[in-house]
Image (cartoon, grey):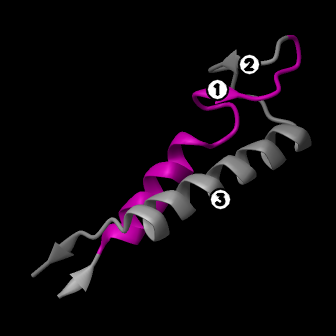
């Protein structure tokens, strides 16, 4: 049996936290901009920290497991 939990959680978070796709923190004109499809170095850094925090919570603290087979 394969554990697909880490793979699914990582892919979903990666897609949702892509800078500029759903939101951008910090934006060019405001603190948060939604769906502007642009990015900056600071927003990449902020999204990286958020991604690391969420992936740590979901995989280590909660322990999400999805088994197949």
Residue drawn 89% across the image and 40% down it: 42
Which sits earlier in the primary sequence, circle 2 or circle 1? Answer: 1
Q: Which numbered dot is residue 65?
A: none
Q: Is residue 25 above or below residue 31?
A: below
Are the residues flagged by discs 2 and 1 in contact, CB closer than 8 Å?
yes
Q: Position of residue 49 (x, y in %)?
A: 74, 52
The verdict on residue 25 being magenta is: yes
Which sits earlier in the primary sequence, circle 1 or circle 3? Answer: 1
Label 3 residue SS? helix
| Residue at the extreme left | 69
**Residue tagged 1:** 23
In screen coordinates, is 60 left or right of 20?
Answer: left
Label 2 residue SS? loop
Label 2, label 1: how far apart the Cα atoms are: 7 Å
Q: Position of residue 25 (x, y in %)?
A: 76, 29
Toward the viewer: 55 or 41? Answer: 55
Task: Give the residues drawn in magenta, as a range.
Answer: 4-29
Q: Position of residue 68 (x, y in %)?
A: 15, 76
Between disc 1 and disc 3, the foreground one is 3
Residue drawn 64% across the image and 26% down it: 23
Toward the viewer: 25 or 22? Answer: 25
**Residue tagged 3:** 52
Q: Is residue 9 above or below residue 28?
A: below
- Occupied quadrant, residue 27: top right
Q: Is residue 40 above or below residue 6?
A: above
Between disc 2 and disc 3, the foreground one is 3
Label 1, label 3: how far apart the Cα atoms are: 17 Å
**Residue tagged 2:** 32
Q: Which corner quadrant holds the C terminus?
A: bottom left
């Amino acid at each position: 049996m394969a554990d697909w939990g880490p793979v699914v959680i990582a892919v979903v978070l990666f897609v949702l936290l892509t800078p500029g796709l759903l939101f951008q923190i910090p934006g060019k004109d405001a603190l948060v901009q939604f769906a502007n499809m642009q990015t900056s170095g600071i927003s990449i850094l902020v999204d990286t920290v958020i991604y690391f925090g969420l992936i740590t919570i979901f995989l280590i603290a909660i322990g999400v497991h999805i088994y197949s087979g």
